[in-house]
Image (spheres, grey):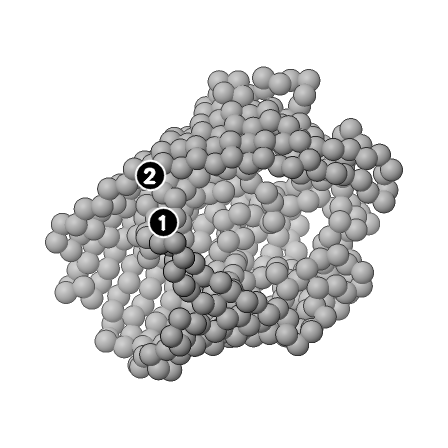
Amino acid sequence: MIYKGLVLQPPEHNESFANAIVSLRHYTEESSGYSLRHNAQFGNTFVQLGGQISNSNGFGPNLSNPYNNFDTTVKGWSGSVEQKLFDEALSLDGGYRRDITHSDVSSTVAANPLANHDVDLAPAQVFAFGARWKIHEMLALNARYFHGDEGTPSDFSMKTKTGVPLHAEKQERVELALEAAPASSFKPTLTWFDYTIDNQKSVLTGANNSLQTYTVNGETYYYYAEADVLRRGIELAVKGDVRQSTSYSFSWTHLTTNSSTTNGVTNDGVGVSTPADYFTALLSHAWEKYRANISVKQVSSWLTSASPVGIQNADLGGYTTVDANIMRTFPFSGYRLTATLYGRNLGDERDSEEAAIPHSRSNRYGRTENGCALGHRAHLCEQARHGADVCRRSRYAGEPLVVDDGEHHALPQKLLSAIALR
């Protein structure tokens, strides 16, 4: 597989209420890559091997930094195996991935345009293991383990106020799930999850809860800090097919722990900076060339929110939103096109702004399917992969070994998630 991309950011006009200086930014970035994957089946043993090389280069100021000059190459490989035993009653799978980034140059300081010249960064590595035991025709037990080491902090432009370098992020995720399928219309799953993240990055806050910033050439940027994070909880999910053209899903996620530890001090954010409970429901119906979806999302309350104006105390959350869409697929000049009409927040619930905090909470949690919101644990998994809302540029951490083409990634789909640390 070959891919090539070009980012031409239009001139960006920058100004703020606090600074009357107006500036323009021009930024370009180009990336290309090659990947190869081989699948092999030996009886009840399924093997996947993959490799990739990708290059990314860019120049100019962007939203993260006033100066960028980089040319980096990522080389990586992965391997996985899935073994079925006892007439497929037991399935075991495991995989490994390793990425090494070579920097021809990677500078965020105009005075040193050739910084990080001809340097190999510490490798990013991932181990993932899983098992599924079919206890009964209607009952199965799942266990998943994931360990990832970023190797090198994924963005050189993240600065600390003290000048001390940030450390690489490490993650461990464990999931245990009990699945049942007494009928096609009722398939419940109960999951316990535990996500541990060492050195997760976040914007530094001061004693007065204001977000700490610095200014370069009239532009404002954040200082960053790191903390060790623990997220633990349970999720109950139910899905089923009411009939051939109608399906539904429901999920409830309850966080028991969402703690952050810095310099030996631990704070739990459940009910304070994050909701403890999150509910989603989705109903989907198809007829002829049309499909309609309606989803309901409910979030419990919490007390604080971080935004550019600082950390604010307010009675947040405790809202319910309803979204819907209708889509139609039709042929056009030999291609298949899909047109979708969306309706967002149909109950006109005021959930995006409270206490003058410019922070959209309706998009903060969950993922989407067919344009509608789904469960919370998948979002927590994304947080565990990506950290706390930090933009990670792929040239530092590496792209996935296989571009998502609608099939499996380089590891079996049963693994906890795609193993790219980004």
* Residue 130 lies in quadrant: bottom left
The type of residue carrying mark 2 is: Met
Q: Quadrant of the N terminus?
A: top left
Q: Nearer the viewer, residue 208 or 334?
A: 334
The type of residue carrying mark 1 is: Asp
Q: Nearer the viewer, residue 82 or 374?
A: 374
- How far separated are the C-alphas under marks 1 and 2? 10 Å
- Please name the residue shown 25% across and 56% down the image: 92
Residues at circles 1 and 2 in contact by the CB criterion of under 8 Å: yes
Residue 248, x across and y down, in percent: 43, 76
**Is any part of residue 164 visible from this angle?**
no
* Residue 217 lies in quadrant: top right
- 46 up-or-down from 120: above or below: below
Mark 2 element type = loop
**Is any part of residue 20 visible from this angle?**
yes
- Please name the residue shown 79% across and 51% down the image: 309
Q: Residue furthest left?
A: 43
- Image disc number at residue 392: none
Residue 138, x across and y down, in percent: 27, 77
Residue 392, x across and y down, in percent: 56, 40
- Please name the residue shown 48% across and 60% down the image: 378
Tell me the residue that label 2 is attached to. 1
Q: Residue furthest front?
A: 333
Mark 1 element type = loop
Tell me the residue that label 1 is attached to. 405
- Please name the residue shown 66% across and 66% down the image: 271
